Amino acid sequence: MNSKTLEGQITYEQIVINKNLKYFKSSSLQNQKTFAAELQTSLNSTPKYISPKFFYDENGSNLFDEICSLPEYYPYDSEIEILKNIESGIKPYVDSDIRLVELGSGSSIKTRLLLNALYNIQKNVEYFPIDISDILSHSVQELCNIYNDLKITGLIDTYENGLNFIEHYDDKPNLISFLGSSFGNFNHDEGMKFLKTIHDMMKHSDFLLIGFDLKKDAVILHNAYNDSKGITAKFNLNVLNRINRELEADFDLTKFAHYAFYNELSSRIEMHLKSLQSQKIKIPGANITISLAKDELIHTENSYKFSISELESKFTKSGFEINEIWCDSNRYFALILAQKI
Ligand SMILES: C[S@@+](CC[C@H](N)C(=O)[O-])C[C@H]1O[C@@H](n2cnc3c(N)ncnc32)[C@H](O)[C@@H]1O
C-alpha cells in the first residue's frame, strides 16, 4: 500500500490487490468533511436538498442494484438490450488498444457486456472504473475473478476528480463510458458544464459513450420511480440512515415518506423526502440543527428525460461529433458514441 498525490492537490491511498488489480482511494477523513460541509449548505437552503451522490453508501449501492432488477425499472433492461449489440457498433471506431474508463461504475454489471465486446475486438483489455462509492472495491474484485487477464486500475472518488486523474494518467486512448442515465441527474447548465469538462480532458483518440433516458409516457416514468415493492422508497430514505450513521444525526425514518413524480414542464422525475410532521433534526457531525414543517420536502434527485434532438444539440454545442446513436426497440433509452472535434 502506498500513496499518490495528483497535481499536488488530492492524496490517494493506493491499494494493490494483485498484479492485475489495484485501486486508488481518497482519504476518508476528507470525504467525511465534504459530506458535512455540503449538508451544511444544502439543508440550510430553501428549498432543502441533498445531493444524489450521497445515496451510495454500501446499502444504497445494493438497493440500487435491487432497483435494476424491478420490472418497473425499464432503463436497466433497455440499456442492456443496446449493450448486447454493442460489439458490431463500436468495432469500426475503437482502436486495437483502447482502455475502458467508466464513470459511476457501481457494481460493473452492465460493464461486462462492454468488456466482452472489447475482448472480441482486441488482444489485451484494460478497465479503469471511477466511483464515489466503496462498492468499487468489491466490484473490481468480482471482475478480476471473472476475467483472469483483465488489467484493472480503479479510483474511488468523484467523476470530476476521476476525469482529472485520467487526463494526467498516460497517452493511451480511452473509451470513456457513463452508463445508467446518471447524466440525467444534472440540470441543463450542470450537464453542459460536465460535457465540456469531459471534452476538454479528452484526447482526439478518445471516445465518449453515454446513456440517456428518453422522454416517454408519464405513467411509465412514474411507475419506474414508485415501484410496487417500495425499493426506490427504501433507496431514497436510506440517505437519512447514512447521515444518522456518519454524522450522528437523529432522523426518524418513520417521520418521512418517499415522494417521486414526473414534472412534465421540466421533463424530469423529481425525487423528494417529505416530512410527515413538523420536526427538528440535530446533525452534530455537520454542526447544524434543521427545522422541517409538516409536508416540507427535501429534494434528493432529478432525473431528466431527453429527446434525441435535444441530445444532438448538447453534443454539438459542447464540441463533440456524434459517431452513433443507438436506441432499444421501445426507444426508451439511447446510447451515444461521440468524439471530440
Ligand atoms: C445510478 S448508479 C449507476 C451504476 C452503473 N453505472 C449502472 O449503470 O448500473 C450511479 C453510480 O454512480 C456513482 N456516483 C454517483 N454520483 C457520483 C459522483 N458525483 N462521482 C462519482 N461517482 C458517483 C454511484 O456511487 C453509483 O455507483
Image (tube, grey):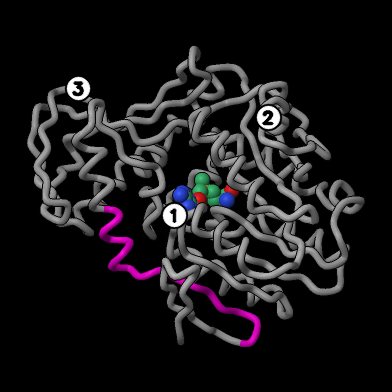
On whether ligand 1 comes within 8 Å of the CB at mark 2, the answer is no
As displayed, is residue 164 above or below residue 40? below
On whether ligand 1 comes within 8 Å of the CB at mark 3, the answer is no
Residue 191, horizontal then vertical, whole percent: 55, 35
Which mark, by number, is residue 295? Answer: 3
The first of marks 3 and 1 along the sequence is 1
Q: Quadrant of the C terminus?
A: top right
Seen at 13% across and 30% down, the residue is: 292
Is 10 displayed left or right of 16 in the figure?
A: left
Within 10 Å of the Cα at label 1, are there few (<14), some (14-19), or many (20+) other Cα atoms?
some
Q: State whether residue 284 appears in this view.
A: yes
Residue receiving disc 2: 317
Q: Is residue 264 magenta?
A: no
Which mark, by number, is residue 37? Answer: none
- Residue type at tag 1: Ser
Numbered range of the magenta stretch: 19-35
The first of marks 3 and 2 along the sequence is 3
The first of marks 2 and 1 along the sequence is 1
Residue receiving disc 1: 61
- Residue type at tag 2: Lys
As displayed, is residue 116 above or below residue 70? below
The residue sitting at the front extreme is 8
Q: How far is mark 3 from mark 2, CA to CA?
A: 40 Å
Within 10 Å of the Cα at label 3, are there few (<14), some (14-19), or many (20+) other Cα atoms?
some
Q: How far is mark 3 from mark 1, CA to CA?
A: 28 Å
